[in-house]
Amino acid sequence: MAQKPAERGRFTVKSLGNPNVLSLNGKSYGGPNPPLIVAELSGNHQQSLDTALALVDAAADCGVDAIKLQTYTADTMTLDVEGPGFRIEDDDSLWKGESLHALYDKAHTPWEWHQAVFQRAADRGMLAFSSPFDASAVEFLESLDVPCYKIASFEMTDLPLVRRVAETGKPMIVSTGMASEAEIAEMLGVIASVKAQPPVLLKCTSTYPSTAENANLRTMPDMHQRFGVPVGLSDHSLGIGVAVAATALGACVIEKHFVLSRDSDAVDAAFSMEPAEMRLLVEECHRAYAALGQVHYGGAAAEQASFKFRRSIYVARDILEGEILTEDCLKVIRPGYGLPPREWDRVLGRRAACNLQRGTPLDWIHVADNEQ
């Protein structure tokens, strides 16, 4: 009896054991390094190359690591026909009433722009790559020698497309969106079947915008453990909180849509980051990464000066040599220059080795017949 696809996928990915790190162009992201922060330009260029290039410059000014395009045409995405499903009828959709063909025609990035946009990114020290939506887009992007590929969440079940991208041998980043465990396993099995390197899986919520409550970020480390591949986040929520939390959970990639102004009529403006927000996101994700540090107990180097604020044993009144040390002449107080409070019971009942003035931090040299 043939195995079910999900079983076949689980068998394939079970042997994968990869750190939560993306290696790209000789640099590593995640693990011991901050995540790769990607500004998704999508259709926010509003069919203006000047705007597209301005987006690249703004992203570079914000400190992001990479920009991403989407490579398709209206005709590679859908058919220019009327019929069930070819027009968006969802009342909650940002694009209600639009035909799919018209929407994709408005949102697509002209292929002749790609080289100029990628070159501008390179000039500004950023990586640049794209999401192909069919095999012809893969061939085109290969001609531009992109460093990696992104598979969009709605395309991750397009296994022929996944296979074609895997065959390039380039690193892959895959948004999981609504994918079930079985669908993810099957997709990973296709990638493994052509002996391609395991992809990065991005936790993604396929609503626009999404909410923090729908992020379910605990899925991200679970995917890493379950499938043995690096993980990250593709985030459609407003604000930076979800991305910062994902960084704290170990994301090696953070992807956010980017726009010059949400007041524009760009197709994805409503759930995209403006430059000031993107700059803050970069800063806070890096701060979250830095805060992870390492497992450490005891005072860090930066804390050494604070030891003086601990409590310790002090002389509370003048004491004569030979006098028995009791609770009425000693006190546990701040600062922390005396014996630590754990020595309290060992000190009581001993005799003073010398005259002691009120306010003296008690030391063993002040205690006669001690048993150190």
Image (cartoon, grey):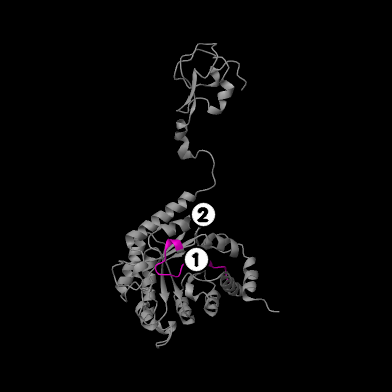
Closer to us: 23 or 107:
107
Residue drawn at x 53%, y 27% as measured from the top left: 341
Closer to the camera: disc 2 or disc 1?
1
Query: Could you classify mark 1 by the number of other residues whose Cα lies within 10 Å: few (under 14), some (14-19), or many (20 or more)?
Result: many
Quadrant where the N terminus sits is: bottom right
Residue where numbered disc 1 is placed:
202
Depth check, front residue: 2 or 331: 331
Q: Residue at x 47, y 33 (%)?
A: 307
> Of the residues under marks 2 and 1, which one precedes in the sequence?
2
Looking at the image, is 181 positioned above or below residue 329? below
Q: Residues within 10 Å of mark 2 (few under 14, many from 20)?
A: some
Depth check, front residue: 202 or 141: 202
Magenta stretch holds residue 317: no
Q: Residue 25: which numbered mark, if any?
A: none
Distance (Cα) linking label 2 and label 1: 19 Å
The range drawn in magenta is: 196-213
Check disc 2 and report the residue beneath it.
Answer: 32
Find residue 61 and report its image quarter.
bottom left
Q: Magenta residues: mostly which secondary structure?
A: loop
Residue ID at (50%, 56%): 249
Q: Is residue 204 magenta?
A: yes
Q: Amino acid at mark 1?
A: Leu
Across and down, in percent, residue 144 comes to 44, 75
Report which quarter residue 235 is drawn in. bottom left
Q: Position of residue 330 (x, y in %)?
A: 50, 20
| Amino acid type assigned to the residue bearing label 2 in the image | Pro
